[in-house]
Amino acid sequence: MDTQKKNQSKTQYTYEVLRARIVDGTYGPGHRIVIDQIAKELKLSIIPVREAIRQLEADGLIQYKPYSGAVVSIIDETEYLESLSVLAVLEGYATALGAKHMPKESIESLKSLNQQMNDALYNFEFEQFGELNRMFHTVIYNHCGNSSLQEQIRQTWQRLDRVRHTGSTFVPKRARESIEEHAHTIRLIEEQAPFSEIESFVRQHKMNTAKAFTQRKEVGKDLPKTTI
């Protein structure tokens, strides 16, 4: 392996280590990342660490702040929570509408996606988990029969994407609960539960995510601040 490939390999390794720590919450929003200490910990020179941080900055997971250096990006928490609340109402209604028109093959697709989410969580593939979650809900609301509602949901998802980063909002415990709630949503659809029951459950499903984020934030206030 030539020198360039070795450097690329070290940079990718560093990138994956740092990204995993951001995603699982080890490095929370505002956490300062010290290049020299990371290099020492990973037994690398500072070059691949700097390159990895540049990649993470391009991903929006890290930003540079005066007098602080590289820190984990801080999301607009108010807009994130407000957008989640809007999405809860929209998706609750869309799911209740779509349940009446859901063919068997789509229900099987939901079961498969939920199992894949479980596998992704088990393998710490958090980005994949998020993509599968999006696909799960898309399958449902695509059957709602209301194109204006579908567009509103897509726009709200896009707004969420602008204000959040996977590492800033991902809560592993909540992810496990989400899989269980998805399974219950599927059962409600299969059983053709009342419209109001489906709408209420799916709306609460989304609000539980907002609640988990808020609780993690409150717990974080009481934790000692560490720099690595």
Image (spheres, rainbow, N blue to C red):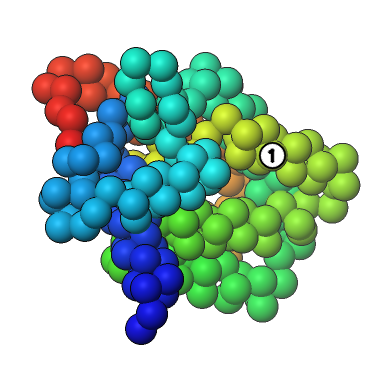
| Nearer-the-camera pick, 72 or 52 | 52
- Out of 56 and 196, give the one closest to the viewer: 56
Q: Residue at x 69, y 39 (%)?
A: 158
Q: How many marks?
A: 1
Q: Nearer the viewer, residue 73 or 212?
A: 73
- Which of 44 and 119 lies nearest the eye of the viewer? 44
Q: Split into 4 quadrants, where in the image is the N terminus?
A: bottom left
Residue placed under numbered mark 1 in the picture: 158
Asked if residue 145 can be seen in this view, the reply is yes
Crowding near the residue tagged with mark 1, few <14, some 14–19, many ≥20 C-alpha atoms within 10 Å = few
Does 60 appear above or below 221? Answer: below
Which residue is located at x 27 percent, y 19 percent? 218
Q: Position of residue 6 (x, y in %)?
A: 35, 72
Quarter holding the C terminus is: top left
Q: Is residue 146 left or right of residue 14?
A: right
Mark 1 lies on a secondary structure that is helix
Instruction: Tell me the kind of residue under disc 1.
Output: Gln
Residue 192 image point, x, y percent: 62, 59
49 in relation to 27, above or below:
below
Q: Residue furthest bottom?
A: 1
Residue 139 in the image: x percent, y percent?
Answer: 67, 61
Q: Residue furthest front?
A: 3
Residue 99 sits in quarter:
bottom right
Q: Residue at x 53, y 45 (%)?
A: 59
Give the answer, above or below, for where 179 lies relative to 123. Answer: above
Image coordinates for residue 135, horizontal then vertical, percent:
61, 60
